[in-house]
Image: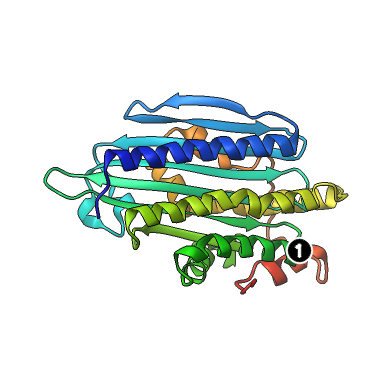
Amino acid sequence: MTTSPNATSSVKAYLQDLQHRIVTALEQADGKSFLSDSWVRPEGGGGTSRLLEEGNVLERGGVGFSHVMGKNLPPSAAANRPHIAGREWEAMGVSLVLHPRNPYIPTVHMNVRFFTTHAEGEEPVWWFGGGMDLTPYYGFAEDAQHFHRTCRDALAPYGEDLYPRFKKWCDEYFYLKHRQEPRGAGGIFFDDFNALPFDQAFAMQRSVGDAFLDAYLPILQARRDMPYGERERDFQAYRRGRYVEFNLVFDRGTLFGLQSGGRTESILMSMPPLVKWRYNWQPEPGSAEARLYSDFLVHKEWL
């Protein structure tokens, strides 16, 4: 399976447009504007980070586009294909994390990306990756069901087996092994995907990216005006600590970005603004906080 420069340009154009459409919709929902920070990577490439801090709805939200390249692919990025380590490589994607102020609105993550490597005399090796996942603090079953249904419907035209596969992959990937708990209520995740011809694989990635606003904005709108107090904010800050732990210890994108000399500010804009850790804290039995653990931080079939 090969790609052409025109195909790579088409992926880049789609990703830049996706970033613009998502930021525009989020600005309308929040009422405040994202700042725009374009940057150049000395080793090759660059990107644009769009960030909103202290918004009306979003306490912190980042939607980043990057297109970077290098001469020597790190072995950590070629774990599934050790023969491509050391090749010239090119990576592009849109990645976002939204941390709402209201604890009844879940945090959400979405990423769609494209990766290709080149070596003289060899066919390019390419793949797509991405997905989205929901991290509630106070869970609502209808929110998780809506989110998963939207993910399933986005994938359905490209194979009925994709949602079950990618849902399971998400459950296994976004799992804090040292805590023995999922990061949230899941969603879909895929990586190293080139099982379809390029045009179909690219169409599938577009379907996932385009589904994000349909998956998340109805949840945000339904929960944004729910009243909350210090107890809920305190629990939100405690649970955000799990988000930090996962991103810094396990997340492949974060680790690859840091190891490949990426732009630290852009890589770490997924971090929540306020976080707390407590020693051996446990929720009160029967509480709303306890129900997050019993009903949402479990692997289950939401549909």
The image quarter in which residue 138 lies: bottom right
| Callout 1 amino acid | Phe
Please tell me whether residue 130 is drawn above or below residue 282 in the rendered image: above
Residue 268 seen anywhere in this rendered image of the structure: no
Quarter of the image that includes the N terminus = bottom left
Q: Is residue 28 above or below residue 152?
A: above
Find residue 92 and report its horizontal and vertical position in percent: 40, 41
The x, y position of residue 236, in whole percent, is 73, 51
Residue at image position (46%, 40%) is: 14
Q: Residue at x 44, y 53 (%)?
A: 203
Q: Nearer the viewer, residue 198 or 270?
A: 198
- Indicate the position of residue 70 as horizontal and vertical percent values: 29, 36
Q: How is the image coloured?
A: rainbow
Relative to 199, 15 lies left or right: right
- Of residues 116 and 104, the one nearer the viewer is 116
Location of residue 24 by image quarter: top right
Secondary structure under tag 1 reads: loop
Residue visible at 24% across and 37% down in the picture:
71
Query: Exactly how many numbered labels are in the figure?
Result: 1
Quadrant of the frame with the C terminus: bottom right
What residue sits right under mark 1 in the picture? 140
Q: Residue at x 58, y 57 (%)?
A: 133
